[in-house]
Image (cartoon, helix red, strand yellow):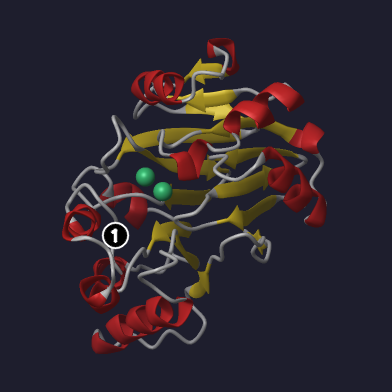
Amino acid sequence: MDLIFCSLSSGSSGNCYYLGNRGHGILIDAGISATSIRNYLRTINVSMRSIDGVVVTHNHSDHIRGLEVFTRKNSIPAYATMKVRESILAAEKKISPGYIKEIPMRQAFSLAGFEIEVFPVCHDAPETIGLHISAGTKKITIATDLGHICQTSAPYIKAANLLVIESNYDEQMLLNGKYPQFLKARIKSDHGHLGNHQAASFLAEMAGDNLENICLAHLSLNNNTPELALNTLYKAFSEKGIDLNGHPRILVLERNRPSEMIKL
Ligand SMILES: [Zn+2]
Ligand SMILES: [Zn+2]
């Protein structure tokens, strides 16, 4: 099998994504338990030995919850930018510094046969990154925690054949929900999370022929539903006069369950 993407778990309660390339692979984040990661990889027939590393986007617990145990028990290194690395070590005292290798910001490096370039996104961690990954002619962009799509991140998002993008909350559900005012403000802010309408209007505006797959990611358990995220995106495309007709394919990633395997 050549290039495969599979979300093991996506959402505000835990994130972990698998990307495989001719028998090698990486994980992006380890925000679920090491046991769940192992079980989900087994479910999708991916050997632990084929995982060359875990690239970590930021230090929030829904992205690093299983990192210490997973890296230690399997002797698999994590990869993070200098600031993300420091913030993980500050948040997760048990993790050994030797298990986190430093990667450059906005400068390509190789891992598991991929060329990976990470870029900064606006989010309220000490630093948060998105990933732009190339394998042959295929480009994958993953941006799961961002308050808005800024000028730095937009080109990476536009260049993707497979795009994993946050669609965190439905604006009405958040407004009418039970969260305290400060938390609502945090989520909605430019350094919080991306709402359904924000993601949908950007995608309807930018989607080019190169975009083959959209995965809506990191849905809030309390402020969103897969149907709302999907319908908002369909509506935005239809308002632009775009007849989707299966291109791009759209998938909503679920929490605590591997997605279908997307082959590129
Ligand atoms: Zn976060
Ligand atoms: Zn998150």
Depth order, front residue of 152/230:
230
Q: How many marks?
A: 1
Indicate the position of residue 4 as horizontal and vertical percent values: 67, 53
Name the quarter showing ligand 1: top left
Dot 1 beta carbon under 8 Å from ligand 2: no
- Measured as percent of width and height from the top left, residue 111 is found at 60, 29
Q: Which amino acid, by three-letter code, is at mark 1?
A: Leu
The reply, left or right, for residue 89 in relation to residue 262 is left
Q: Secondary structure at mark 1?
A: loop
Residue at point 24%, 88% (across, down)? 239
Left or right for 204, reference 136: left
At a point 36% along the width and 63% down the height, the residue shown is: 168
Residue found at the very far top of the displayed protein: 98
Which residue does the image show at 44% across and 66% down from the upper left? 221
Q: Is residue 47 left or right of residue 245?
A: right
Residue at figure coordinates x 43%, y 42% from the top left: 132
In this rendering, is residue 193 above or below 152? below
Q: Position of residue 31 (x, y in %)?
A: 54, 43
Neighbourhood count class around disc 1 (C-alpha, 10 Å): few under 14, some 14–19, many 20 upward = many
Q: Which residue is mark 1?
A: 194
**Compared to 36, does 250 lie above or below?**
below
In front: 110, or 45? 45
Give the quarter of the figure containing the C terminus: bottom right
From the viewer's perspective, tell me whether residue 210 is left or right of residue 124.
Answer: right
Front one among 102 and 61: 61
Q: Position of residue 34 (x, y in %)?
A: 68, 38
Query: Residue 117 lies in what quarter of the image?
Result: top left
| Position above or below: 217 against 17 | below
